Amino acid sequence: SSSQAMNFGKSRARFQMEAKTGVKFDDVAGVEEAKEELQEVVTFLKQPERFTAVGARIPKGVLLVGPPGTGKTLLAKAIAGEASVPFFSISGSEFVEMFVGVGASRVRDLFKKAKENAPCLIFIDEIDAVGRQRGAGIGGGNDEREQTLNQLLTEMDGFEGNTGIIIIAATNRPDVLDAALLRPGRFDRQVIVDAPDLKGRLEILQVHARNKKIDESVSLDAIARRTPGFTGADLANLLNEAAILTARRRKDAITILEINDAVDRVVAGMEGTPLVDSKIKRLIGYHEVGYAIVGTLLKDHDPVQKVSLIPRGQSRGLTWFTPDEEHFLMSRSQLKARITAVLGGRAAEEVIFGLPEVTGGMRENRKLEYATSIARQMVTQYGMSEIGQFSLESPNSEVFLGRDWMNKSEYSEEIASQIDRKVREIVSQCYDTAKRLIQENRTLVDHLVETLIEQETIDGEQFRQIVSEHQDKQIADAAT
Ligand code: ADP
């Protein structure tokens, strides 16, 4: 069509270049580890001779891995800014549905321009769009995409590491990438850029509050506590929305009223396409309600804030709790409550649909890992078991999703297997508790799932109200 033809015409210059990004590491917050790792890339660009003098091969490519809006583009710009080099960028998604040959020639042009401007940084956003495993497309390969990918590989191999070009690519799906991309001399370094935790959110809010007038009565800390699950982009958006509302209301400074309205707007904007398939909806409904109800029935658990069927990112449904404090020293019963609740979704699926239906998926595996890591923490760090009332772990280490944070070499094989046995025991006890709670409250669970499917979301207050009405009715029924 003619619009495609126009795209074709413009395509030869379809990458961006910024001579100076003006972004510094100080502008990126809540991702300290990533910043530390990337600091060295700045040195590669600024003082390559420091490495080449001793015969070190400077890496060419770094892969930033993390969900959208966590600051991957911002980090790449900060590297260029800190090193005072030009920033070239292109998005993998732009290669999709182009005429054969266009993507490859665009890649060639990009590297040609980059070489003319070295030292410089090339940023490839959404590299998975072009870098998927070759021959894996629907109905075989996608010629255009594969040609583009081959060209990218050729270009990366075609220059020396000390040419002064560093390529940073971003993706949320490292698992689908063609293995050739990850070989030595290509994107052989990976840096994780995770969604921020409480402290990270506060730091990001502080960065974005710098250029805004915020009333003294507003506590950024309180906002950070209210926004679990928000990415850096969500938080930037939140403060910007609040500033717009403030201007519209002709106020001098942002108050909590504008913040509240802005939180609602940002949350509304996050909502993806509602689920359509009713069977899947039911399955996810039971999963989410299972998590929320188990958490609610255990008195040592944080209160549920929201249960939602609206997909976001890679997760299909979403339930979240308001943590009283994100502290690490919790009592034994609090830790157990957390494990039990985390397993509540899986337990509900098993009770309702039977074992074979229990869904796997990445998020579910992470939940199981998370539950296991808490149990491990109970056993090793807090000495909460018969293995001994001593700590096998430094008190400062944190429970991290899916990270093996134990230093296994510090104790013997025998203790290690005792720990494993104890961890499994705690997890399975908690799972049994979760299942029992679901079974004992089956009518309530069914009712909550119906409500959830109808409304798509249930906020914490309504959730607790439904639970307490149900409990009152049970007491009344028992009395008659
Ligand atoms: P990604 O590339 O991971 O999708 P971006 O870097 O494009 O995310 O983030 C979009 C915007 O959100 C940034 O320009 C910035 O304003 C804000 N932002 C995201 N993450 C952070 C962060 N870690 N610190 C500060 N601001 C952030």
Image: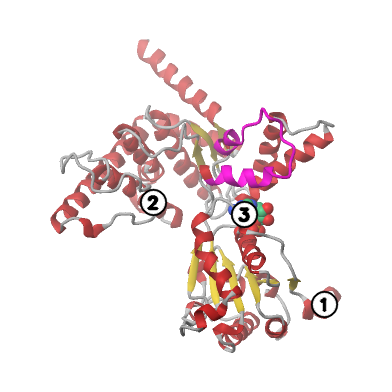
Q: Which mark is first along the chain, 1 or 3?
A: 1
Q: Main secondary structure of the magenta part?
A: helix
What is the spatial separation of the Cα atoms under label 3 and label 1, in whole angstroms? Answer: 36 Å
Residue that carries the numbered disc 3 in the rendered image:
26
The amino acid type of the residue labelled 2 equals: Val
Q: Does residue 138 show up?
A: no
Q: Quadrant of the N terminus?
A: bottom right
Which marked residue is nearer to the observer: mark 1 or mark 2? Answer: 1
Please name the residue shown 50% across and 61% down the image.
36
Numbered tag placed on residue 358 in the rendering: 2
Please name the residue shown 20% across and 46% down the image.
422
Residue that carries the numbered disc 1 in the rendered image:
10
Q: With respect to residue 106, does 128 lie above or below?
A: above
Q: Position of residue 209 (x, y in %)?
A: 68, 42
What is the spatial separation of the Cα atoms under label 1 and label 2, in whole angstroms? Answer: 49 Å
Q: Position of residue 285 (x, y in %)?
A: 50, 42
Q: Does residue 82 show up?
A: yes
The amino acid type of the residue labelled 1 equals: Lys
